[in-house]
Image (cartoon, rainbow, N blue to C red):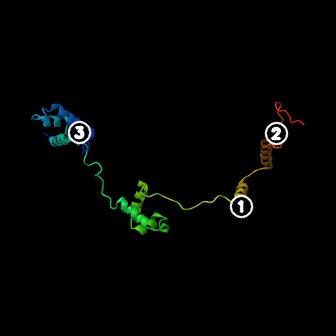
Amino acid sequence: MSTPPRSSRELTEETKLDVSIALQALARLGKLPRGTINLVATRFGIDRSTVRKVWRCYQQGSMKSRKKGRVCRKHRHKIQDIIAKIREVPQGQRTTKRDLSLATGLSISTLSRALHKGIMTRRSSRLKPLLTDANKNQRMDFCSSHAVLTEDDVAAYRSTVTESVAPVDDPPPSPDRVPPGP
């Protein structure tokens, strides 16, 4: 009797747990009666050898997948090797990934992966100075040369600026305030 095909090759943790609970419910004095594995295999639609493996793992106390963490392709360079090679390169040759790749012998994709994983970080030594007064005046002249303003616009702007800014000579007299006497 063949079992129906599953959607994925590996059993999920929940399915393994359900199979082990079903087997535990049918166990007598820690042993499975004859035909129990076949019964559970047909109930869950998996092969009897899979049920047997799940039961053995359950008895040993390790239900987690042994593949987890070991399923990807092995990396060519270890993290410590990448860090050591980058540290050997002088600071002046670390400007771009291409320069760093030529100096270390690592590929650009390996360096990009290391950057994405956080093994190395980007740093910029470029300092951007603040604008000087001459640069500020030059930028204002450039912007004003492109602005199309009429004399009415300029007059309206000046009137709003002068109205909003009051001279601060003396504060207005307050009725609660007593003037200083002789």
How far across and how far down the image is residue 40, in percent? 17, 35
The residue wearing badge 1 is: 134
Which amino acid does the dot numbered 2 rest on?
Pro
How far across and how far down the image is residue 5, in percent? 21, 42
Task: Give the spatial CA distance, label 1 vs label 3.
Answer: 75 Å
Residue 27 placement: quadrant: top left
Q: Quick one: which residue is furthest to the left in this view?
A: 34
Residue 175 placement: quadrant: top right
Return the residue nearer the eye: 3 or 100.
Answer: 100
How far across and how far down the image is residue 158, in percent? 79, 47
Residue 57 placement: quadrant: top left
Which amino acid does the dot numbered 1 rest on?
Ala
Task: Give the spatial CA distance, label 2 vs label 3.
Answer: 83 Å
Query: Dot 1 surroundings within 10 Å: few (below 14), some, or many (20 or more)?
Result: few
Quadrant of the frame with the C terminus = top right
Q: Residue at x 41, y 61 (%)?
A: 111
Asked if marks 2 and 1 touch (Cβ < 8 Å), the reply is: no
Disc on the earlier residue, 2 or 1: 1
Tell me: 155 left or right of 25: right
Q: Residue at x 78, y 48 (%)?
A: 154
The residue wearing badge 3 is: 16
The residue wearing badge 2 is: 171
At mark 3, the secondary structure is helix
Disc on the earlier residue, 2 or 3: 3
Tell me: 125 left or right of 74: right
How far across and how far down the image is residue 161, in percent? 78, 45
User: Residue 55, labelled with which disc?
Assistant: none
Tell me: 79 left or right of 38: right
